[in-house]
Amino acid sequence: MSQESVEQAIHRAGGALQLLRNSPIRPHTFPVAAEFTNWRTEQRAWRDSVALLDQSHHMTDLYIQGPDALRLLSDLGVNSFAKFGPGRAKQYVAVNPDGHLIGDAVLFHLEQDHFDLVGHPMVLDWVQYHLETGDYDATTERDDNSYDRTPGQPPKVYRYEVQGPNAVALLEKVTGAAVPNVKFFHMCTFTIAGHEVRALRHGMAGQPGFELFGPWEEGEAVRDAILAAGEEFDLVRAGAKAYSTANLESAWIPAPFPAVFSGDKLKAYREWLGTAAMGSLGGSMDSEDITDYYVTPYDIGYGNIVAFDHDFVGRDALEEIAKNPRRTKVTLVWNADDVAQAIGSLYQSDELPAKFVEFPKARYALHQSDKVLVNGQLAGISMDVGYIANERAMVSLATVDLAHSEPGTQVTVVWGESPNTDKPGVEAHRQVEIRATVAPAPYVQFARSTYRDR
């Protein structure tokens, strides 16, 4: 944690929105090679053959162990834990007392009373705070991502994703055994290069696959064995650029704005939380009410995860929200002509250009919040935007009012900031409106159905 707390930083900046809009903290990137071939080919690999992605460096692990570890997680998670035994994992979701999302991460139940919470720091910090300030008989070990870890110190574990239609055949080749019939988000073990490898049945881009992990010192041998066996299955290594877009196909929103920056109920948490864990806020949303940036689990597709079979922080609020959800998650397919015009403005010298559109991922703040309009009125928030080569489409993941959520509905996304902020990734530019069409989330039919089929 940094010496300055988030609460102190808010007061110094004159408000949370001022602090976050001008924060120099960039979006999370992935400290692996940007491309091994090119990001278009690497995107296509998880659709057409098999891709190998390295997750070892960009995520943080919070290991929680002890007799009260499960109670701690249950007290803070909206998920049901009734049947959550060792060898399973789940998308763990936590909310604040008002039912607004703090964050999500993948929770691995490794052994009895031993868990690994993996993801961006938002929800990990929330869990660690409650352990340190609450009455729980448990301990934590934190393995920060490679940006924040002590220089020269490797990760505790390697973590690889093997996914695509050839993933199972590849794993059978490299292990010399049939791949067990494992349900989605259940774990099994493989033997690769003489090492025991734990595997989670998973699929980041909506394709069949496994997340493989084990001790860091064994990772190179495991990776080399996969690469050696992969040629006959058209294995392609996916670099950071392609990896950053995998969520667009499976419709996972990586960094919704965490609802911790306002309210007396969370003041003690903000006093504990260091600014090193803080992100940046970008986009065309310009409300001065910070709660307008908050979302609920129902807004971004986690409504089916919420289980009222236990007490947890925010339960009473979510029970009321569940009666009348306001918004839902969708994919917005951006109008190709409007995107081309925005990019083309970079070559026109007679006026200020539009905000630069990065490829393949165009998000330029950790927490992207762009206005979605219908007839000039706010109808939602676009949160993550990028290009899917497999669909030849620029898309964004968004939450929109239920009244405008039907596929085919026409909306407008406001791209760029007004006024421009001081974030390093923001150059002088003008706002532009880009037409978009509402589509399902996930956008890809295979991801909507087959890959989660148990």
Image (tube, helix red, strand yellow):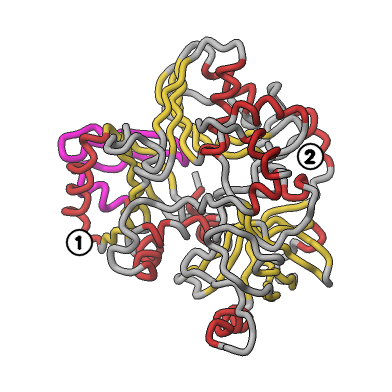
Membership of 186 in magenta stretch: yes
Type of amino acid at the residue the image marks with label 2: Ala
Q: Which mark is residue 42?
A: none
Q: How many badges with numbers are in the image?
A: 2
Q: What's the distance in space between the residues labelled 2 and 1, CA to CA?
A: 49 Å
* Residue at image coords 43%, 25%: 63
The mark closer to the camera, 2 or 1, is 2
Image x and y of residue 27, in percent = 51, 53
Q: Is residue 254 left or right of residue 99?
A: left
Image x and y of residue 279, in percent = 57, 46
Residue 423 seen anywhere in this rendered image of the structure = yes
What is the quadrant of residue 239 in the picture?
A: bottom left
Image x and y of residue 51, in percent = 33, 57
Are the two marked residues, 2 and 1, in contact with CB atoms closer than 8 angstroms? Answer: no
> 368 above or below 85?
below
What is the quadrant of residue 305 in the picture?
A: top right
Membership of 332 in magenta stretch: no
Residue in front for this viewpoint, 169 or 436: 436
- Density class for disc 2 (Cα within 10 Å; few <14, some 14-19, many ≥20) is some
> 12 above or below 52?
above
To which residue does mark 2 refer? 322
- Density class for disc 1 (Cα within 10 Å; few <14, some 14-19, many ≥20) is few
* Residue at image coords 20%, 34%: 195
- For label 2, the SS is helix
* Residue at image coords 83%, 72%: 375
* Residue at image coords 39%, 43%: 147
> 57 above or below 360?
above
Q: Is residue 331 left or right of residue 108?
A: right
Q: Which residues are magenta?
A: 168-196
Q: Is residue 254 left or right of residue 296?
A: left
Image x and y of residue 262, in percent = 74, 37
To which residue does mark 1 refer? 232
